[in-house]
Structure formats: structure tokens, C-alpha cells
Image: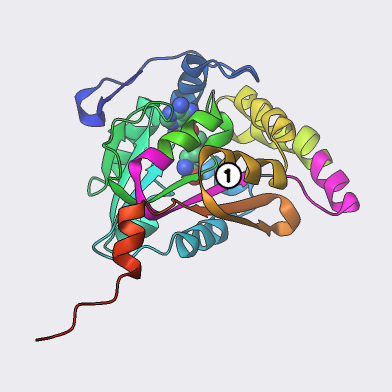
Amino acid sequence: MVVANVCDNEMVSSTPIRASLDKRPEEVATMFDDVAPKYDVVNDVLSLGQTRRWRKIVFDAVGAVPGQRVLDLAAGTGTSSEPYADAGIDVVACDFSLGMLKVGKRRRPDIDFVAGDAMNLPFEDDSFDACTISFGLRNVNEPRKALAEMLRVTRPGGRIVVAEFSHPTVPVWRTMYTEYLMRALPAIARKVSSNPDAYVYLAESIRAWPNQDELAHWLQDAGWEDVAYRNLNGGIVAVHRGVKPLTDDAAASTARPAPAAR
Ligand SMILES: C[S@@+](CC[C@H](N)C(=O)[O-])C[C@H]1O[C@@H](n2cnc3c(N)ncnc32)[C@H](O)[C@@H]1O
């Protein structure tokens, strides 16, 4: 596991690699190191420009305000962290690909980039008001462990928001989308990406990912409450959210009436 500030590390050199679906963490990190320089451009092209809209919806769902601290996990180059920084919110962009973090730090030196593994976060208990992860959970070797870690570092009453590719709910749309994923996307990636195999992995990992209801159960199993989700673009993306239960003490202090003025 890598736990250090990104500035203290050298980029991991890599040859093009495609992670297998059982997601060995080193393979995943190396694959993202490899695509890092063109990651954001390729993302915009392959999502047909939808990522900006999705990020705005995630930002609104997190609902953070200045003065609060947000963890953007699997933040990659920090594009998913930018809306928080731009709104004056204290955001920590954490990822285990040093290549992705370096590209991000170069572009946004004002954002706090931290190298760390989602399954063993280098943060204290209850230290964030909200945690979010965009298009990252699917890549984590043990996603349920990451959901539990996010619960640990979120304060009681704090929120989680997960944005991830999911499964279109209307059959015709699902068929068209599957065609795009398995045929068009790898073909476009061959033209625009330095590591097209990474995008074959992307397509396969999206197909293998649990559906909306199953992911909601994973969140509940990890201990999150009030779990709900919203489909975007007919279910191509789902945004799940939940709340960390209040401890007995925190619940009592919220419920207790304010002392009367003397
Ligand atoms: C598709 S990128 C998403 C980046 C960013 N959140 C965005 O929306 O553009 C997925 C990221 O997950 C990171 N990742 C995968 N497994 C991880 C783990 N165990 N710990 C930390 N980061 C991880 C990868 O390094 C990669 O940067």
C-alpha cells in the first residue's frame, strides 16, 4: 500500500497493461499510471461530454458547504475534486495511482492530493463531513472494504455519495449501451488513448459490476443508513447516497432541547 503525500513520490514507470477483472491492486494502479496523461480528455470523449453533468449532480448530492471537509476517494487526477475546491470546500483527493495524482497536482496545486489505498485509508476515524467516490469503487479490489473504510473516516451523521457506471433499466437502451461498451468504446479508445486495453477492461468491468439494488445493499451492509440511489442517463450511471448513523451521544445531543436562558 502507498501512503504518502504525492509530492514525496516518484511516478511509477509502467508498460501498457490491462487489469484483469479480479483486479490485482498493483495492476490497477499501473494501468491508471499509464492512462493518466490523457485520462481527462479521453474521459470526455468516451462519455460523449456527459461527465461534467454527472459531476455537478454528485457535487449537489454531497451537499457540502465551506467549512466542511470532504474526502474524494479514488480521485485520480482530481477532476472529481475540483467542484469542491472551486466552491471553497476543504477537499482531500486520495488515490493510489501516483501517476494520476501527479497529473492532478500539476494541474491543481491548490488541491490536497494524498496517496492512499481505499481499503486501508490513511485518515483518522470520523475526520470527514462527507466521503465521495466517482467511477472508482468498481476498480477497488475489495469494494465492500472501501465502503466500510469510508464509513470509518466519516463523522456520525455525515454522508457518502458513490457515482458509478451501472445498468440501464430499459431493455432496448441496455442493448444499445452494451453494443457501445463492447464494440464502439474499444474502437474509439484505440484512436484516442495510449492504452486502449485499459478501455476494454473498463467495458468488461462495467458489465461485471452489481446492479443498482445490489450496490445499495452493499452500502447498507457496510453500515450506511438511509441509502437511496438515482439513475442518470437511464441507468448508465447511478448515484448512491447514504448517511453514517449517529452515535447514541450524538443523537442525544441533537434531540436534547437547548438549555433555557437564565
Ligand atoms: C476511473 S478513475 C476515477 C477518477 C476520478 N474520481 C474521476 O471521476 O475522474 C478510478 C481511480 O480509482 C483509483 N483506484 C482504484 N483502486 C484504488 C484503491 N484501492 N485505492 C485508491 N484508489 C484506487 C485508480 O487509481 C483511478 O485513479
User: Residue 227's x, y, as percent?
Assistant: 58, 53
In the rendered image, which residue does mark 1 sit on? 220
The residue nearer to you, when weighing 31 against 191, is 31
- Farthest right residue? 172
Judging depth in this view, the residue of 59 and 227 nearest the camera is 227
> How many numbered marks appear?
1
Q: Start and end of the magenta stretch?
A: 151-178
Please check the rendered image and state whether residue 158 is part of the magenta-colored stretch, yes or no: yes
Q: Is residue 229 left or right of residue 13?
A: right
**Label 1 is placed on what type of residue?**
Gln
Tell which of 26 and 184 is nearer to you.
Answer: 26
Q: Residue 159's spot in the image, x, y percent?
A: 43, 54
The residue at 36%/62% (across/down) is 64
Query: Which residue is rendered at x = 36% and y = 53% of the image?
Result: 248
Q: In the rendered image, is residue 39 in sight?
A: no
Residue sitting at x 83%, y 39%: 179
Residue closest to the far bottom = 262
